[in-house]
Image (cartoon, grey):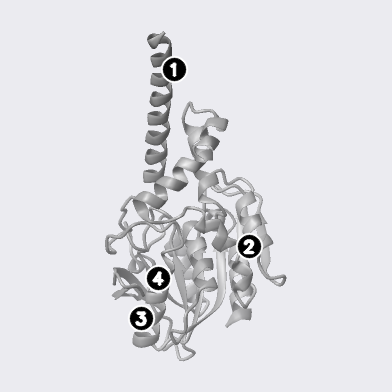
Amino acid sequence: MKKLIILPVTIIIFMIIIYIGLSLYITDLAYDAKRNFPEENPSDYSLIYEDVSFKSYSKDDIELKGWWIPHGSNEKGEAIIWIHGLDAERSGGEGKLEMMKEINEMGYSLLTFDLRGHGESGIAPLGLGVREKEDIYGAMKFLYDEKNISKVGLWGISYGAVVAIDAGINEPNLGPNIVGIMADTPYFSVLELLTKEVSDRTPIPKFVAELLKFGIIQSGKMLHGMDINDVPESMANNDKIDFPILITSCKTDERVPESHPSRVYSFSRGSSEYHIFDKCEDHGEAYETNKSRYMDLFKKYFSSRF
């Protein structure tokens, strides 16, 4: 009789251990960024630039490293802040500095920098796109104090797009004002992306991956002091941004499906814009595959915002 009781209890304990282990593993993946470093710099594209460093606008004072790419005398006091994706760095990877060159030639000064835990910037826990708004505010304060910039446009991709939107929602009074946001492929729910990746890349069935959601949420709270559901909560509040935003996505993006940017857009102000590209070579490569249309959207939007 005892053996009959012990066997199911042992199985239950084993399943609980497996559940906890998988939840911790997936949570660790969500909060861990890989450090990569630029393989090229603006001078490779005949751009004049300056190495800069500044602190995040937070009690942690995280040191952030970047490049300031000025345009002329910049008498208008305007600049674009480029915000890279997860595991990327200030150059944005292949093709992005070419894009920055085009934007600089339109007449815009740019600041591009490594977010916390990325590139050459300071060590800090990943914030899934929500904590990183403090890095944007630090960049804005730097531009105001050191470069006499009073108007800022935010332009981010994927994780960087989420950072840009969250920064716009919670903007403090720092001196410079955020006047426009271009969000290229923002995700709506990290939890959905994680469970999808688990079912796509492992033998774990989709329904089992769905069951892990509770464990992932609790692991994030215990290990990182953050609720992973803060991301969709933030994205659903983007109508608090007091100007129209520009959102783009790609039908063929498998990493961040088109359903994510479309949901972000559904919560934005009525005058915001949403543009879908039919094809992109890879995640976050709308520019590389659709250069002319992408730059036309950028130019039209920001010329109306500055």
Closer to viewer: mark 4 or mark 1: 1
Q: Which of pointers 2 and 1 lies earlier in the amino acid sequence?
A: 1
Quarter holding the N terminus?
A: top left
Outermost residue toward the front in this view: 1
Q: In this rendering, would 157 be left or right of 70?
A: right
Say which element carries label 2.
Answer: helix
Closer to viewer: mark 2 or mark 1: 1
Q: Position of residue 226 (x, y in %)?
A: 42, 56
Outermost residue toward the bottom in this view: 75
Please tell me which residue is depicted at 53% across the width and 77% down the height of the picture. 106
Please tell me which residue is depicted at 53% across the width and 73% down the height of the picture. 168
Q: Amino acid at mark 3?
A: Phe
Q: Amino acid at mark 4?
A: Glu
Closer to viewer: mark 4 or mark 2: 4
* Residue topped by disc 1: 8
Say which element carries label 1.
Answer: helix
Please tell me which residue is depicted at 36% across the width and 81% down the height of the picture. 142
* Residue topped by disc 2: 293
Instruction: Assess whether mark 4 and mark 3 are in contact (beta carbons under 8 angstroms).
Output: no
Closer to viewer: mark 2 or mark 3: 3
Cα separation, mark 2 vs mark 1, equals 61 Å
Q: Amino acid at mark 1?
A: Pro
277 relative to 208, above or below: below
Cα separation, mark 4 vs mark 2, equals 32 Å
Say which element carries label 4.
Answer: helix
Q: Position of residue 241 (x, y in %)?
A: 60, 74
* Residue topped by disc 4: 134
Cα separation, mark 3 vs mark 4, equals 12 Å
Outermost residue toward the right in this view: 270
147 relative to 94, above or below: below
Q: Which of pointers 4 and 2 lies earlier in the amino acid sequence?
A: 4
Cα separation, mark 4 vs mark 1, equals 50 Å
